[in-house]
Image (spheres, rainbow, N blue to C red):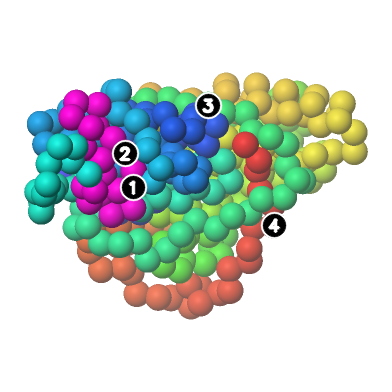
């Protein structure tokens, strides 16, 4: 818990720690997430790994001068080597015995669709789910964005069901039409129907029907597929929220456009949508950074299902997951596309 939020700043689940292209082979990289100094690296087989950063011998930071040797990470100070999978020390130069407690804490990692994800759980529990790949060539390569924000992961996810903030913050004509699809385990799936001023995508004076299909995977990942029927245009925003410390998150975004009839048309729409995303998405940031969290908010009939989302979110703080409802038994359709990185 923090003084600002009545829950841990470090919920359990999968969280982005790098884009795949950011992590070079055999080059350990220091990162700071979950209030910890960590080291991210690839072993010689190309697999990404994440571990606590400091050598248990005399505290050297393995992300500053450490190196990869086969399937292990070598300390820059005394060349102790640690197995990438188990974290166990496997070599101490000039010593006949390895101290039995010599090991690094390691974290489960998966690399999906150009993003390196690490699993965090304060109790040390192993992951019970993974993020599925949804890759196809139908979508353009991503445009990347990132920000450091004073907020928590849950606030961003909660925003995805907040129907009534859209007119005030994002210039929608009226609150969104919320349609629940399913709530099953770590996944929350719903749609928002919005009437938007066409100026958002370069068509001022028109009102466009826009449908957002939202898939939240835990409190660290949101996929939003946006469809503008009048223009036959689809975009996908992938959002990744990772706690840095008790007060800040690292928010990454990857934006894709479904490829159109010609490369030229695709590029035109991609530029238009990228400009609109950059201008519009950031409008939420000052609110997130300065609002307070009300455990018992005063809600109106125009709001989305805030209470439902908060019950669902409890499972990521070591509390019991919400009881399944009829909606949670709906078969989840697999997202049919994926981004490339």
Does residue 291 show up?
Answer: no
Query: Can you tell which quarter of the image residue 204 is in?
Result: top right
- SS under mark 4: loop
Residue 88 spot, x, y in % from top left: 22, 51
Q: Earlier in the sequence, mark 2 or mark 3?
A: 2
**Mark 4 — residue?**
336
Distance from label 4 to label 2 (Cα)? Answer: 38 Å
Residue 236 spot, x, y in % from top left: 64, 42
**Mark 2 — residue?**
73
- SS under mark 3: strand
Label 3 or label 1, whichever lies nearer to me, is 1
The residue positioned 19% from the left and 26% from the top of the image is 77
In the rendered image, which quarter contains the C terminus? top right
Residue 315 spot, x, y in % from top left: 30, 62
Disc 3, disc 1: CB below 8 Å?
A: no
* In the image: residue 210, left or right of residue 162: right
Q: Which mark is residue 145?
A: 3
What crowding class fits label 2: few (fewer than 14 Cα within 10 Å), some (14-19), or many (20 or more)?
A: many
Disc 4, disc 2: CB below 8 Å?
A: no
Q: Earlier in the sequence, mark 3 or mark 1?
A: 1
Q: Earlier in the sequence, mark 4 or mark 2?
A: 2
Q: Earlier in the sequence, mark 1 or mark 4?
A: 1
**Mark 1 — residue?**
84
């Amino acid at each position: 818990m923090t003084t600002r939020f009545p829950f841990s700043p470090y919920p359990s689940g999968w969280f982005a720690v790098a884009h795949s292209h950011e992590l070079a082979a055999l080059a350990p990289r220091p990162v700071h997430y979950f209030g910890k100094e960590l080291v991210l690296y690839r072993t010689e087989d190309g697999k990404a790994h994440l571990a606590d950063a400091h050598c248990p011998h005399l505290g050297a930071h393995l992300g500053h001068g450490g190196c990869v040797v086969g399937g292990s990470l070598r300390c820059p100070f005394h060349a102790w080597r640690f197995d990438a999978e188990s974290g166990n020390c496997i070599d101490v130069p000039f010593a006949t015995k390895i101290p039995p407690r010599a090991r690094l804490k390691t974290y489960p990692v998966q690399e999906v669709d150009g993003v390196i994800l690490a699993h965090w759980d304060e109790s040390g529990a192993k992951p019970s789910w993974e993020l599925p790949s949804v890759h196809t060539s139908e979508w353009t390569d991503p445009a990347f964005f990132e920000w450091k924000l004073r907020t928590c992961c849950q606030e961003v996810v909660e925003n995805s069901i907040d129907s009534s903030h859209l007119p005030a913050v994002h210039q929608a004509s009226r609150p969104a039409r919320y349609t629940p699809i399913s709530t099953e385990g770590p996944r929350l799936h719903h749609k928002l129907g919005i009437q938007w001023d066409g100026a958002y995508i370069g068509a001022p004076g028109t009102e466009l029907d826009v449908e957002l299909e939202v898939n939240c995977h835990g409190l660290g990942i949101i996929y939003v597929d946006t469809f503008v029927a009048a223009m036959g245009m689809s975009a996908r925003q992938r959002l990744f929220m990772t706690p840095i410390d008790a007060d800040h998150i690292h928010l990454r975004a990857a934006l894709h456009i479904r490829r159109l009839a010609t490369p030229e048309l695709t590029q035109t729409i991609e530029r238009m949508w990228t400009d609109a995303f950059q201008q519009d998405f950031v409008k939420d940031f000052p609110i997130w950074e300065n609002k307070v969290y009300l455990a018992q908010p005063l809600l109106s009939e125009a709001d989305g299902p805030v209470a439902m989302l908060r019950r669902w979110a409890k499972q990521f703080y070591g509390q019991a997951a919400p009881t399944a409802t009829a909606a949670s038994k709906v078969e989840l359709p697999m997202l049919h596309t994926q981004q490339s990185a």
